[in-house]
Amino acid sequence: MATARPFLDARFGLARHVVLPGPLALDGGGALAPVEIAYETYGSLAPDGGNAILICHALTGDQHVASLHPRTGKPGWWTRMVGSGKPIDPARHFVVCANVLGSCMGSSGPATIDPATGAEWGMAFPVLTIRDMVRAQGLLLDHLGVRRLCAVVGGSMGGMQALSWPATFPDRVEAAVVIASTARHTAQNIAFHEVGRQAVMADPRWRGGDYYAHGDDVADPPVAGLAVARMAAHITYLSEAGLTEKFGRRLQGRAGNPDGAKSFGFDADFQVESYLRHQGIAFVDRFDANSYLYITRAMDYFDLAEEHGGRLADAFRASSARFCLVSFDTDWLYPTAESRRIVHALNAAGARASFVELSSPYGHDAFLLDAPELNRVVDGFLRAGG
């Protein structure tokens, strides 16, 4: 029997944690049971159940899509898209956002307790795929009484899930919004992730993934390695034009040298160095190193065509969903060519698809930043579905 613990969020919406009995069959073999899922809901499910929207988060995101983050105190990561008068509006939609499997904000992952041992899973947690995450979301929606989604929406890794949903559950999705994403990870994507994973595992504090608190031991996570991993990944989320505009080669002021000057050493002389170090330090306060390993591996394994006999179009043939794809012209992590590849596959499958490339100086992160054109595209697409 599922158990749930609800509480009212500091702003709006309902934050919950549910333990589902499972078992959840995994692509890598075996099964996970029980299945813990932390999630938030906003708005109310319509009597006919026709207004449910699932929002899927990116690699380092979480379920706090439009409410205050409990650790950082900052607003939700997509308050520009979700809220009163926004494209995804709790006054019209029943909005669900779940923390993905493998993450560290309440869903089953390496930092949660293995019921067989009574200790954290650590690296004994099973390796996951994007499709495993989607199947877990399906279990959650079953628990919530949501039989069909009027839309599934996501950017980046969330877009991978949004693509996987109609491929995995073709009868449960009416529309999919896929933003700044891809149908498979390229060699370059995998390479950047491997640099980050090696940075984590090279940190002496990683200790094979066993760095959690036990008994009188205090948790001692590999923060240095995780910070470096975050710094390397963060570069891929930006654009050269955006970095040049924001930082250029400007030097960083510091105590005793407010105007900035070269140290002829290895301090953060340049503003961009200081920015990246700050990003790394801030990240380790809210994320688990093992979760970073597991989720990046799930992204690397993602290849929707491979899951359907090697032809991407076959992933969509059983679905009657509408699709909206959005890319950004300065996104070099998941460039426009990747979205066009998906559109061509959708066309080959006879699916209804719309596509737009938006202009932004912000690179991959544009979908999280102020993008009025993106809001108009998403709003128009969702309203066109009724």
Image (tube, helix red, strand yellow):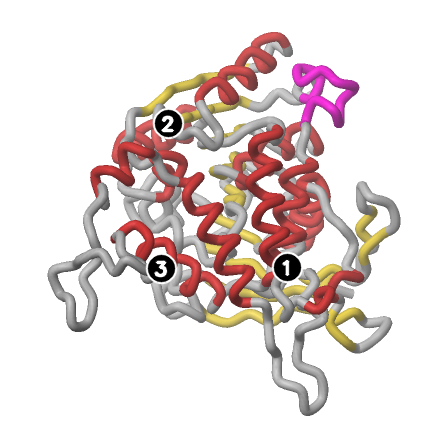
Residue 262 to residue 351: above or below: below
Q: Which residues are magenta?
A: 304-315
Q: Say what amino acid the circle numbered 1 marks.
A: Ala
Q: Say what amino acid the circle numbered 3 marks.
A: Phe
Does residue 386 appear to the left or right of 18 in the view shown?
left
Which mark is in front, 3 or 2? 3
Considering the image in quadrants, where does the C terminus appear? top left
Residue 303 to residue 21: above or below: above
Marks 3 and 2 in Cβ contact (< 8 Å): no
Does residue 248 appear to the left or right of 340 in the view shown?
left
Q: Say what amino acid the circle numbered 2 marks.
A: Phe
Work out whether residue 34 or residue 226 is closer to the camera in this orientation and state it. 226
* Residue topped by disc 3: 266
Q: Earlier in the sequence, mark 2 or mark 1?
A: 1
- At a point 78% along the width and 65% down the height, the residue shown is 1
- At a point 34% along the width and 35% down the height, the residue shown is 239
User: Mark 3 Cα within 10 Å, few/some/many (few <14, many 20+)?
Assistant: few
Work out whether residue 328 or residue 149 is closer to the camera in this orientation and state it. 328
Label 3 sits on a secondary structure element that is loop
Q: Which mark is residue 301?
A: none
| Residue extending furthest toward the bottom | 216
- At a point 32% along the width and 60% down the height, the residue shown is 265
Image quadrant assignment for residue 326: top left
* Residue topped by disc 1: 202
Mark 3–mark 2 distance (CA, rounded to whole Å): 35 Å
Q: Which mark is residue 328?
A: 2
Residue 175 visible in the snapshot: yes
User: Mark 1 Cα within 10 Å, few/some/many (few <14, many 20+)?
Assistant: some
Residue 302 to residue 234: above or below: above
Which mark is in front, 3 or 1? 3
Label 2 sits on a secondary structure element that is strand
